[in-house]
Image (cartoon, rainbow, N blue to C red):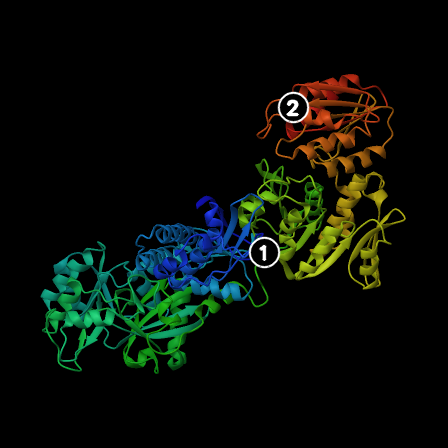
Amino acid sequence: MEVIRIRALRGPNLWSHHTAVEAIVKCTADEENIDKLPGFEVRLRARFPGIAALQPIGHDDAIPMAHVLELATLALQAEAGCPVTFSRTTPTLETGIYQMVVEYTEEEVGRLAVELAEQLLKSALDDTPFDLPGALAQLRDLDEDVRLGPSTGAIVHAAVVRNIPFKRMTKGSMVMFGWGSRQRRIQAAEMDSTGAIAETIAQDKELTKKLLDAAGVPVPHGRAAEDEEDAWKAANEVGLPVVIKPKDGNQGKGVTVNITTREQVFKAFAAAREFRDDILVERFLPGHDFRLLVIGNKLIAAARRDPPHVVGDGVHSVRELVELVNADPRRGSGHATSLTKIRFDDIALARLALQGYEADSVPPKGQRVILRNNANLSTGGSATDVTDDVHPEVAARAVEAAQMIGLDICGVDVVCDSVLQPIEAQGGGVVEVNAAPGLRMHLTPSYGKGRPVGEAIISAMFPEGDDGRIPVVAVTGTNGKTTTVRLIAHLMASSGLRVGMTNTDGVYINGRRTDSGDCSGPRSARNVLQHPDVDAAVFETARGGVLREGLAFDRCKVAVVTNIGAGDHLGLNYITTVEDLAVLKRVIVQNVDKNGVAVLNAMDPIVAGMAASCKGKVTFFGADREHPVIATHLAQGRRTVYIEDGQLIAAEGKHAEAVALSEVPITRNGAIGFQVENVMAAVAAAWGAGIDWESIRKGLATFANDSDNAPGRFNMFSYKGATVIADYGHNPDAMLALVQAVDALPAKRRSVVISGAGDRRDEDIRQQTEILGKAFDDVLLYQDQCQRGRADGEVVALLRQGLAGAPRTNYVDEINGEFIAIDTALARLQPGDLCLVLVDQVEESLAHIAKRVAEA
């Protein structure tokens, strides 16, 4: 067995809505059915008992090795703690070649699972050992390294529940919620609205204390110390006992509390200096350590934090008691678990010494032994939820502290006996204010109930009913995609929206091109969704991008399918039939939002059949009102777009809007049939996206199908009294549409300049000239710049074969080079002639034609 190729499907895809690893797997003849491998399944289960039951995947009751690889990949992730459930293996038309798809939650973990599953199968084949615990440990460790931590994960989960899309922007904890101009961002538990100055103030403990004191929030008095002697002097000024800590520390690093002697001051100062140069000496406040979490202007959660400790049993030593506590599965080495392992280090040993213990001392039964001065969870402390106990005055002081500093999410550390009474009444105080506070203690406290802090953060960023989404329109099909995308974007822009658009020409933000080339894939779409100046997005969604990575979005507001034709890259990537192609392009329809709409060509039965896959509503379009699909939809009162008496009619129930085709320049008064179809699709999409009819009419009247606005899409030029049309059509369906359009235009003599893309089937290339040979007098063949795997002259030869027996063509020429072919065709034109140029290098060829027109 060999894994030929593996790739990550990072969005909804051909197989499912899940992110997934897709692999192309090659099996030997024996491996096409594991029943031919005696003892294999027994050896496999001995190594991995958790693998699911092996079931045949085809009609021949065979269980191919690729299917076993699929099940092993899924089961390894599941046993490692990843919540995955979907997988599938499908045979291709090539003997021994399978497509295997397995869901992942983290891409790196999914890829590693495939590798480990390969190793597992090989060990079962060769009867060699396989380290299952080691493999699962690898997956768990990697998953813990790459997945979001509990704080950020809780916020993301709350967003998902609210149907708010999210995207992880880095390998760390920076996450974008929403799209375009409605997006918000977080970094761990810090919002994008939090100012850098507020964060800087929170890091400066001395400045924080001054501001809080000015606001009437009780704080412990103290000052900065220059050296050990100055620290001792400061301690006497504020009164013993004291706390010594770094001026801008975090997670309790370098903090020593309840200091009562000169010797302790010197040691504590040295410990703090290991982390920062600026050291604070503060009055020690007796009492418990409380963390109050403020989000916006509300106290959301509160917890009492206890320092890491063990309780003696009269049998075990302190070291052994720590090991027993750390064996708790809730305790991990990082922040991924609800608790952190207690650190048994020099600081812990020093704290033991203050209590008269050493590491191997056996404390009496019931004796509480403290292992650190601070109660931070990151050093092994524990937390008890006390949210319901917080006195209103305590909550008010916490909110005042957060607002004085300017933090949207704030962890306020208070030391007092109890939160049941006001802080001032107990002689307590706010000892610290934290930006980006950890949320673990509130999500999964050691004792008490967890609090929905993720939901509170999301609610602070997105008011109820706001899902952070901008209208997204996805357009796919065989022909007309680019023009339809451009027209939809133009209609949306006419309503005042800033529109992001992707197509085969580039990426456009509010009319400005930000990237060039074929940008019809998910990477370009994701870039648009990240742009803060985009109010709506329109994406040309090509088959290749969906196959490579899936969609760039989880759901779209509108999905448009223009048509499905036979010439669209059939035979590539195991898409071999029109039905296969339809299933692939149907992906955007399957992922329409429940409040969205699919815009489908009623005249194409394959496209019309996609309506059953849409979770939202369906708008059908088609020129013939009497077509059964159109007529039925109209009778049911559902949205329908059709043509009647030279007008585009958009009807829903008893209401209808009409636009005269004479007012839509790109249709040439309705004479160009494929442009009429593009207009119907675009109008239905804009309607579905909520664009008003005044803007739709304005946009239709002002959309110019010129080489600047829609390059390579039926761009018309006048050359010495002849008509020249440049188009990027490159498949049989496009040829049929172009012939129909050209037939509607007057001409004395008709000529065409054509090449062919080498990554099409032979029959598709031949069929193009079979169609053109019936409509054009002269045919000029040229070889384009990139033959896409074909030998020199091979494509031109296939094109010439298609002209064999052409009923109309009486002149055929072969020319080496696109520009030379264009010049040759132009030189033959007479006034009243028409020439169709099927361009390959779109921008360059259009510029060349424009230059010749200007020279003439």
Q: Residues within 10 Å of mark 2 (few under 14, many from 20)?
A: many
Look at label 2 and name its amino acid.
Gln
Closer to the camera: disc 2 or disc 1? Answer: 1
Using the rendered image of the protein, determine whether residue 826 is visible from the camera's viewpoint. yes
Residue 783: mark = 2
* In the rendered image, the vertical position of residue 347 relative to residue 732, given as above or below: below
Q: Residues within 10 Å of mark 1 (few under 14, many from 20)?
A: few
Q: How many marks?
A: 2
> Which mark, by number, is residue 59?
1
Residues under labels 2 and 1: Cα distance? 45 Å
Identified by mark 1, the residue type is: His
Considering only vertical position in the picture, is 278 above or below 5? below
SS at badge 2: loop
Is residue 279 toward the left or the right of residue 63 in the image?
left
Towards the viewer: 223 or 755: 755
Q: Please say whether residue 690 is visible from this viewpoint.
A: no
Q: Residue at x 58, y 43 (%)?
A: 544
Image coords of residue 489 (percent x, y):
68, 46
- Residue 656 x, y percent position in the rendering: 83, 58
CB of mark 2 within 8 Å of CB of mark 1? no
